[in-house]
Amino acid sequence: MARNAHPEVTRQRILNAARAQFAAKGFEKTSIQDILNELGDLSKGAIYHHFASKEAILDALSNQDMEFTENIFARLDSDKTMSGLQKLQETMRSTMRDKQHLTAIRALLPQLDDPTTLAANLRHWGNELSQQLLVYIEEGVADGSTPTQYPREAAQMLAILPNYWLIPHFFPGTPSELRHRIECLEAMLEAINVPVFDGALIDDFMTGIAVLAAPSNESSAEAPQIVTEQ
């Protein structure tokens, strides 16, 4: 049998196909055969050559998501033209505008129903992620764009609340309820002089979170409503 000259290309194709199927059907309802059908030209053995299980594919997608965030931070860390506040806003804007990233996150959300996995993520958000955001807030303290007396607390709020409190998987609500929740976070941050949110960023959050809340068979390019209001 001929050796695959481009194993990384094949591996990425498998991940892309799995991401599409997880988004269309949900992780639990997607089979290895579904991923094969999406690919069209690979054998089951080829998938198992790269990944031991469907869970291993999900782990690889999770690692890619972490790389996505790290790449945003690397780009902003090297930018000497932006204020600390602008870097905070760009971090959230880049995340909420990337549909592929959000689709991958949507596939991962059911894993957070496991208490151990959720606790591990809360620790990551509260420690590693908040530490990176703290860098930008402290830059904002120095340049005057975020003149807060609570830089560490603000970083923890920005790391944990958008990843948990604003996510309909954990706290379902209508679009108007979600917007009200985001505006509440906006008000809390403004009260401690970290004015991250403006109307445009709130709209980005509404659109991005709607992608996270899409039903597993959602295929429309339009972002769905979170919960139909009565």
Image (cartoon, rainbow, N blue to C red):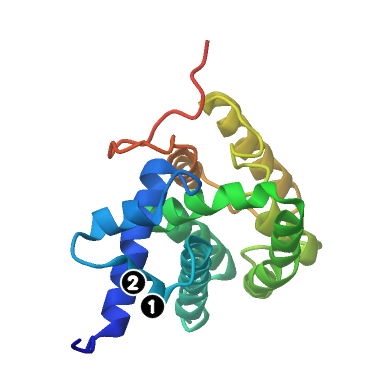
Question: x, y (%) of residue 49?
Answer: 38, 77
Rendered-image quadrant of the N terminus:
bottom left
Q: Is residue 190 left or right of residue 64?
A: right
Question: x, y (%) of residue 217?
Answer: 37, 36
Numbered disc 2: secondary structure: helix
Which amino acid, mark 1?
His
Question: x, y (%) of residue 174?
Answer: 55, 24
Task: Check the image and report above or below for 58 versus 188.
Answer: below
Q: Residues within 10 Å of mark 1 (few under 14, many from 20)?
A: few
Task: Check the image and report above or below for 77 versus 41.
Answer: below
What numbered label is drawn on residue 28?
Answer: none
Q: Residue visible at 59% across and 54% down? A: 196
Q: Is residue 109 left or right of residue 138?
A: left
Q: Quadrant of residue 129?
A: bottom right
What residue is shown with label 1? Answer: 49
* Number of marks in picture: 2
The Cα–Cα distance between marks 1 and 2, rounded to whole angstroms, is 6 Å
Task: Check the image and report above or below for 22 versus 45.
Answer: above
Which amino acid, mark 2?
Gly
Q: Residue visible at 40% across and 77% down? A: 50
Q: Examine the rendering and report whether any part of residue 181 can be seen.
A: yes
Q: Examine the rendering and report whether any part of residue 81 can be seen.
A: no
Q: Nearer the viewer, residue 33 or 66?
A: 33
Question: x, y (%) of residue 16?
Answer: 32, 63
Q: Residue visible at 18% across and 65% down? A: 41
Q: Nearer the viewer, residue 121 or 24?
A: 24
Numbered disc 1: secondary structure: helix
Q: Is residue 151 left or right of residue 174?
A: right
Q: Disc 1, disc 2: CB below 8 Å?
A: yes
Q: Quadrant of residue 184?
A: top right
What residue is shown with label 2? Answer: 45
